[in-house]
Amino acid sequence: MSGRVEDLSPKQAEALAKFRGNVQDMLSSLPSPDDYFLLKWLRARNFNLQKSEAMLRKHIEFRKHMDLEDILKNWQPSEVVRLYLSGGLCGHDQEGHPIWYDVVGPIDPKGLLFSASKQELIKTKVRDCEMLMEECNMQTKKLGTKIEEVVMIYDCEGLALKHLWKPAIETYIEVLTMYEDHYPESLKRLFIIKAPRLFPVAYNLVKPFLSEDTRKKIMVLGDNWKEVLQKYISPDQLPVYYGGTLTDPDGDPKCKSKINYGGDIPKSYYVRDQVKQQYEQSVTINRGSSHQVDYEILFPGCVLRWQFMSEGADIGFGVFLKKKVGQRQKAGEMTEVKTSVRYNAHMVPEDDSMTCSEPGIYVLRFDNTYSFLHSKKVNFSVEVLLPDKVTEEQIHQLGARTEKKLSLT
């Protein structure tokens, strides 16, 4: 049995009755104390009464902390977030479920975190969730049938290394955790469209924070994505830009009155020029010397991501590929894959990444050979980001113009 209203086993029905009794003291604080709502929390924890109750009680505290009863009426994000955080609610699928678009490519991660706090960005996504739940309620009244799930379309065109910036990924993981903890069983289906070769790396970063149920609802579409979307969504509910016939009143095929497409944020909005980071390693590099850190890349498609800051003065930095394994080599004896230049990392911490096009030993080299007087202390962190291999293989296969579900493995 699915564990939904009118599809409960005797054991599930008994659990629902007990659960209602256990949480009787907080029913008045819930947005909807009906069986549909309570069953979401039970399904999310496999009908474990203790875990379901603990999850729901945490949600009640979350609602109070975020003032969710009035968030749609009394709270608005700042101008920069309203203008540049992409996404939007536009249309409904064939069964009446709301459709939310996330447009990844135009997002300016650094600009957002330099212009707004992480807390504001998360609260904005919470507000979006409440707006979607309100839309579900309106659809329920309009259609006369229960609508409690949403459809999401992730437009991944333009997904790039800038989107893998560590503070941005950490913020996105907090948003995903918020979804899973406070809006369980609210996703009907998630379509990934226009996924580039970098997508398996990005997905592998967030995959551990997605529930098994969420992973099962993800579908990565190939070049025929417009055709596939129309199997689930009527053309008059899809923007022209996404393969349908829907436009704004002024004829805009992207429906920009409903979907925000983001963009680069002007520096006039910046309130800070860096995001505080913690570094995993520290080294003092003597004058006239250099420091090398080796990372073995076993297959192409991996991403090297690094952050560093120096103390007191600038430091040189470059990335090289070793020709000989197992021994230290001078810069001139290696293949330079990222040009070595001097960075004012004592003023503004550096962070960057690169996709490794071939396997081998990649050497991150901090260069102080030009300094005849001063040693330099460098704090740094380096990560190797691996692609989700199953997803990567599926993306290769999607050239055959078929739709596939994203595997859990």
Image (cartoon, rainbow, N blue to C red):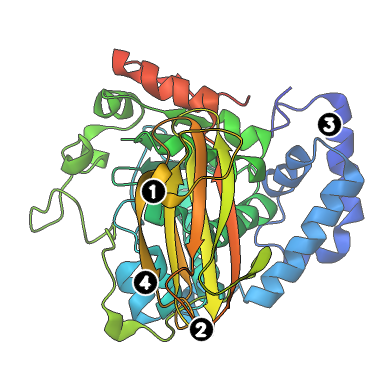
> For the residue carrying disc 3, how many other residues have a C-alpha within 10 Å: few (<14), some (14-19), or many (20+)?
many
Q: Secondary structure at mark 2?
A: loop
Identify the residue at image location x=67%, y=56%: 182
In the image, residue 16 lies at what x, y percent? 83, 41
Asked where in the image residue 375 lies, by quadrant, the reply is bottom right
Q: CA distance from mark 4 to mark 3?
A: 48 Å
In the image, residue 397 lies at what x, y percent? 38, 16
Foreground disc of the pair 2, 3: 2
Residue at the top extreme of this rendering: 400
Badge 3 is on which residue? 12
Badge 2 is on which residue? 373
Q: Nearer the viewer, residue 322 or 400?
A: 322
Which of the numbered marks, if any, corresponds to residue 111? 4
- Between discs 4 and 3, the one toward the N terminus: 3
Identify the residue at image location x=68%, y=69%: 63
Foreground disc of the pair 4, 3: 4
On the rendered structure, is 363 left or right of 379? left
Which of the numbered marks, if any, corresponds to residue 393? none
Q: CA distance from mark 1 to mark 4?
A: 37 Å
In the image, residue 73 lies at what x, y percent? 47, 77
- Between discs 1 and 4, the one toward the N terminus: 4
Which quarter of the rendered picture does the C terminus lie within?
top right
Foreground disc of the pair 1, 4: 1
Q: CA distance from mark 2 to mark 3?
A: 74 Å
> For the residue carrying disc 2, how many other residues have a C-alpha within 10 Å: few (<14), some (14-19), or many (20+)?
few
Badge 1 is on which residue? 332
Does residue 141 sit above or below 79 in this rendering? above
